[in-house]
Image (cartoon, helix red, strand yellow):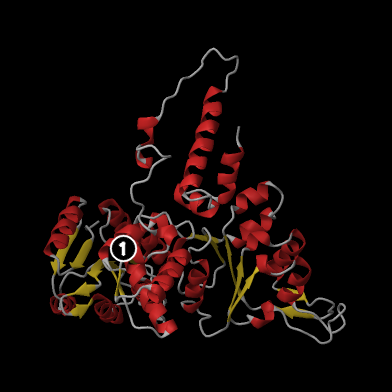
């Protein structure tokens, strides 16, 4: 069997060299190009060896790797193409996959992963359909976020159910909207409903609708969210808060594709893609008997986890610029820029409220800062860089608390939980010290310690 022939086009000679040497070490034949014209000339040459796969950079010198891929696939739709880029975002990821790319590879990449992709691509000869691009405002270049973007691109031409997980404020609804906008249902409605925001006794009617006279106050027929989302996407946010009684009904709808309105006798066919989201651990709820295991497994056909902001802090500078621009447009205020010291400080914070919290801070900064360049001292008090702090009136720095710590362990005590005992005392002492620093403001003290108010209260109550 003859070795695989791989063509590589990249305007970076370093990338060409590394890939060429690695693939040759894997006993593959390699031809490298720096210009699209040279590759197409080789592609069109008579009696020239034909490649098994093409690896193309998305941004070439003066030309587009995506355009080149379209030309290649126009001549041979079966030829797999792997797109490479150091500047990945949702628009380019979706453009790559919907243009027919076998895979979207973000630089820097792992060479062993490159080898696995080439083996898979040349074995399966997979192709995907073509569809217009609809960019969305998902921003980030961090590895954690790029993995999410790659998955969104991979799912762009599917109609499969998706469960989105992640902490509060990470942007789960934005991800759901992106899935809808890049799906075959993009021209249909996107209907969102928050399970936690609607009383249990009204939720069934909200989802499935009701007939006139179904209950007191039902003066006319009302269609539910499933019917409103016909031909489009129904986004069920905070699905973990759905009552068990309705979980059973939702499972039946998903399984059979039909349901009755509340008080109705006529079956209603459903034609909506279901995307769900939660900030809870559904596996834990299943173990507690608070969420149906069969519904959980049906919903999580594909599970997407949206990373918290603290795991993608390198994205914060770009997000700050984006949110300042958005706020300027929304509030009709002149655009302002963030000082680098401010950006560096914001990138160092834990952001328990995630992207939503950062967006709110940026809006506040744009409105309240007096100058065109926003400085760290323009921040609200809770977010300002802290000057030298002390535990009490002593001169010991808060960040150097060990200098003033004197601990005498009484090992003669008739107990075997000394560690837990001293740990509780330490937690209580630390909580009280920070509360003093924050003038009794429990929210601020909890934020400084990186814990919740409930945890702070528990520390203070320990003895």
Q: Position of residue 203 (x, y in %)?
A: 73, 70
Above or below residue 357? Residue 454 is: above
Q: Position of residue 231 (x, y in %)?
A: 60, 82
Give the residue drawn at x 37%, y 74%: 324
Work out whether 222 lies above or below 108.
below
Instruction: Quadrant for the N terminus, please.
Output: bottom left
Q: Nearer the viewer, residue 197 or 191?
A: 197
Residue 124: give x, y in percent of width and height.
Answer: 38, 63
Q: Is residue 26 visible?
A: yes
Q: Residues within 10 Å of mark 1 (few under 14, many from 20)?
A: some
Dividing the picture into quarters, in which one does residue 250 lie?
bottom right
Left or right: where 460 falls relative to 367: right
Residue located 88% across and 78% down the image: 216
Quarter of the C terminus within the rendering:
top right
Write down the residue under mark 1: 342
Total marks placed: 1
The residue most toward the top is: 412
Q: What residue sits 63% from the left and 57% below the top?
A: 296
| Label 1: element kind | helix
* Residue 128 seen from this side: no
Location of residue 318 in the rendering, given as x and y in whole percent from the top left corner: 32, 68
**Is 194 on the left or on the right of 147, as rendered?**
right
User: Considering depth in this image, is 86 or 256 the residue closer to the camera?
Assistant: 86
Q: Of all residues shown, which one is farthest toward the front?
A: 393
Residue 218 against residue 163 in the figure, above or below: below
């Amino acid at each position: 069997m003859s070795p695989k022939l791989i063509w590589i086009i990249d305007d970076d000679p370093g990338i060409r060299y590394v890939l060429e040497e690695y693939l040759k070490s894997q006993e593959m034949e390699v031809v490298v190009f720096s210009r699209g014209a040279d590759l197409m000339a080789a592609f069109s040459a008579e009696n020239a060896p034909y490649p098994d796969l093409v690896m193309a950079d998305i941004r070439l010198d003066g030309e587009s790797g995506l355009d080149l891929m379209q030309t290649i696939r126009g001549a041979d739709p079966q030829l797999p193409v792997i797109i490479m880029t150091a500047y990945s975002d949702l628009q380019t990821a979706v453009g790559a996959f919907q243009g027919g790319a076998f895979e979207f590879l973000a630089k820097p990449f792992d060479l062993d992963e490159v080898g696995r992709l080439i083996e898979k691509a040349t074995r399966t000869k997979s192709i995907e359909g073509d569809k217009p691009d609809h960019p969305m405002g998902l921003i980030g270049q961090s590895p954690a976020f790029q993995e999410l973007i790659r998955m969104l691109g991979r799912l762009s031409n599917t109609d499969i159910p998706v469960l989105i997980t992640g902490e509060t404020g990470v942007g789960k609804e934005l991800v759901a909207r992106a899935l809808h906008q890049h799906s075959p249902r993009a021209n249909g409605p996107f209907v969102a409903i928050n399970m936690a925001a609607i009383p249990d006794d009204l939720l069934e009617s909200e989802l499935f609708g009701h007939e006139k006279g179904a209950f007191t106050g039902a003066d006319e027929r009302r269609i539910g969210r499933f019917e409103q989302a016909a031909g489009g996407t129904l986004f069920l946010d905070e699905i973990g808060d759905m009552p068990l009684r309705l979980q059973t009904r939702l499972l039946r709808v998903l399984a059979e594709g039909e349901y009755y309105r509340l008080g109705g006798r006529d079956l209603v066919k459903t034609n909506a893609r279901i995307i769900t989201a939660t900030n809870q651990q559904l596996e834990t709820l299943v173990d507690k008997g608070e969420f149906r295991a069969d519904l959980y497994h049906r919903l999580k056909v594909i599970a997407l986890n949206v990373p918290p902001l603290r795991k993608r802090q390198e994205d914060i500078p770009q997000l700050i610029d984006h949110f300042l621009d958005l706020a300027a447009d929304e509030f009709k205020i002149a655009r302002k820029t963030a000082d680098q010291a401010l950006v560096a400080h914001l990138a160092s914070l834990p952001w328990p409220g995630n992207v939503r919290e950062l967006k709110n801070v940026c809006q506040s900064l744009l409105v309240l800062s007096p100058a065109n360049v926003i400085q760290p001292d323009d921040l609200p008090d809770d977010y300002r860089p802290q000057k030298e702090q002390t535990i009490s009136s002593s001169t010991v720095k808060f960040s150097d608390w060990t200098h003033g710590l004197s601990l005498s362990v009484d090992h003669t005590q008739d107990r075997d939980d000394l560690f837990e005992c001293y740990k509780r005392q330490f937690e209580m002492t630390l909580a009280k010290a920070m509360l003093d620093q924050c003038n009794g403001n429990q929210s601020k003290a909890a934020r400084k310690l990186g814990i919740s108010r409930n945890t702070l209260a528990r520390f203070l109550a320990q003895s």
